[in-house]
Amino acid sequence: MLGPVGTTPYDLRLRLFGIPVIVTPWFWLAGLITGWHPKSAEHIDLLIIWIGCLFLSILVHEMGHALTALAFGWPPTVYLYGFGGLAVYRPTYGRTTGRSVLISFAGPGAGFLLYGATLAAEYGLASTEWVHTLDPNWKLRLGYFFLEMEFINLWWGLVNLLPVLPLDGGRIAEALFNRFRPWDGPRLAILLSVVVAGATAIFFVVHRDQYGTYPALLFGLLAFSNIQSLQQPRGPW
């Protein structure tokens, strides 16, 4: 979501549906940091499950963007790096507001589909005899997997749709502002980003006991980044 993507000699490189996917070592480090808590040393297995959930969820999210761009004839590349994921493509022809909005929404949309599939799998397994024969430790791991997959793909997806640049919701708002108010659309998109990011940061500060400090820091940083963008000259407005 933030910052440049820098490749390294240690990147994991693969192709999915013909789309290049590059996973930098910083992605794994970020997963380790965000999943670490004081008792992680006693539950390394749960930390590994968290990193796996993060990898699968962000990969599906970015593939949603990438496959939609590919459907419009714009070859993409997917990066998973320290600040999340990024699907890069270059519209060579036929770029419209509708296509831009659809590509931006396709990431959270893919996550919502994965959330639904995870929820269906959880309820399906809960009704089988096999689950009841599992060792308690494996029940804990399975339950933790479903919990994190549902949390990431539902709640992160909803937060990602907030109209804050450079989140997907911010990109959608930017495309719509540019379409209907081309003379000052970019400025309005950034102003909206500052207001929403600031309000969201305050919300997470007030509820930091429930959500931790990371969301407040993230949206505080997004608000600051958009304020800086607002101060840069961008044309006649």
Image (spheres, grey):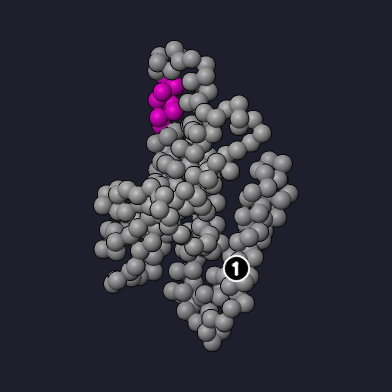
Q: Is residue 18 left or right of residue 197?
A: left
The percent coordinates of residue 228 (x first, y second) are 62, 72
- Pick the front one: 104 or 26: 26
Q: Which residues are magenta?
A: 120-127
Amino acid bearing label 1: Asn
Mark 1 crowd level (few <14, some 14–19, many ≥20, 10 Å Cα):
many
Q: Among all residues in the image, which is located at the extreme front?
A: 9
Res 107 visible: no
Q: Is residue 124 magenta?
A: yes
Of residues 78 and 142, the one nearer the viewer is 78
Give the camera-side residue of 207 and 77.
77
State the quadrant of the C terminus. Answer: bottom right
Viewer-closest of 33 and 85: 33
Which residue is found at the position 50% from the left and 25% from the top?
Answer: 141
Task: Provide the secondary structure element on which disc 1 rests.
Answer: helix
- Residue furthest toward the bottom? 236
Q: Position of residue 213 (x, y in %)?
A: 68, 47
- Is the magenta region chiefly helix, strand or loop? helix
Residue located at (57% from left, 39% from top): 35
Quadrant location of residue 163? bottom right
Label 1: which residue? 226
Residue 194 location in percent, x, y? 62, 66
Question: Up-down: is 233 above or below 172?
Answer: below
Q: What residue is drawn where x is 39% and y is 69%?
A: 97
Q: Is residue 23 left or right of residue 17?
A: right
Kindly identify the residue that appears in the image at 58 percent across and 73 percent down: 229
> Which x, y percent locates residue 139?
50, 20
